[in-house]
Image (cartoon, grey):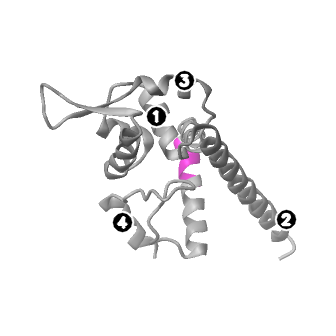
Amino acid sequence: MSKKKPIISNIIDNLRRVFQILNEQSKKVERETGLTSAQLWTIKTINESSPVKVSDLANKLYLHPTTVVGIIDRLEKQDLVRRRRSKDDRRVVWIELTDKVNNLIKSAPEVAQGLLVSGLEEISANNLIEIDRSMKLLVKIFGAQRIPPKLILSAEVNMPQDANVEELDKQK
């Protein structure tokens, strides 16, 4: 047990650091922009490739399209984004920013979820597999395998895809 103690201490301290930065970033985003972190992350992602299809946006955000539509609904109510149906294929919906967003994007702080995604995308596949295994163990320790994943410090639930639900069942 004595050999494990410093390792366990490091793990707990690192988790504390992660929770601390997530909490601080989320509060900063809301204070400076009036938006949730998920909303600002969505706006920043749209800004990178506007206009963007909902399905492509969901892929870039690593979210289920249903979750993205909910975020878009709230952003649209604030006149920050608009939907435009494709003239070629009416099933395709393009999302673009309104002019109201220009100043907001320039001064907005970084979003923790965006930092996490860009950091993870830079890591090798082998290291990602190792992180994934470790995260699954942590989730199992907490008995949280079947809890629907919410966006970081948000009420938004990322609807798991069928494959993820099957994976959750395997972990239980």
The alpha-carbon separation of the residues under discs 2 and 3 comes to 47 Å
Q: Which labelled disc corresponds to residue 43?
A: 1
Q: Which labelled disc corresponds to residue 165?
A: 4
Magenta span covers which residues?
125-130
Which residue is labeled 2 in the image? 6
Q: Amino acid at mark 1?
A: Ile
Which image quadrant: the C terminus? bottom left
Q: Magenta stretch: residue 39 in it?
A: no
Looking at the image, tell me whether mark 2 or mark 4 is earlier in sequence order: 2
Q: Residue at x 72, y 54 (%)?
A: 20
Looking at the image, tell me whether mark 3 or mark 4 is earlier in sequence order: 3
Counting from the top left corner in percent of width and height, residue 137 is at 58, 67
The alpha-carbon separation of the residues under discs 3 and 1 comes to 12 Å
Q: Is residue 136 above or below residue 38?
A: below
Proximity of marks 2 and 4: CB atoms separated by less than 8 Å: no
Looking at the image, tell me whether mark 2 or mark 3 is earlier in sequence order: 2
Which residue is labeled 3 in the image? 103
Counting from the top left corner in percent of width and height, residue 105 is at 54, 27
Badge 1 marks a residue whose secondary structure is: helix
| Nearer the camera: disc 2 or disc 1 | 1
Badge 4 marks a residue whose secondary structure is: helix
Which quadrant of the figure has residue 97? Answer: top left
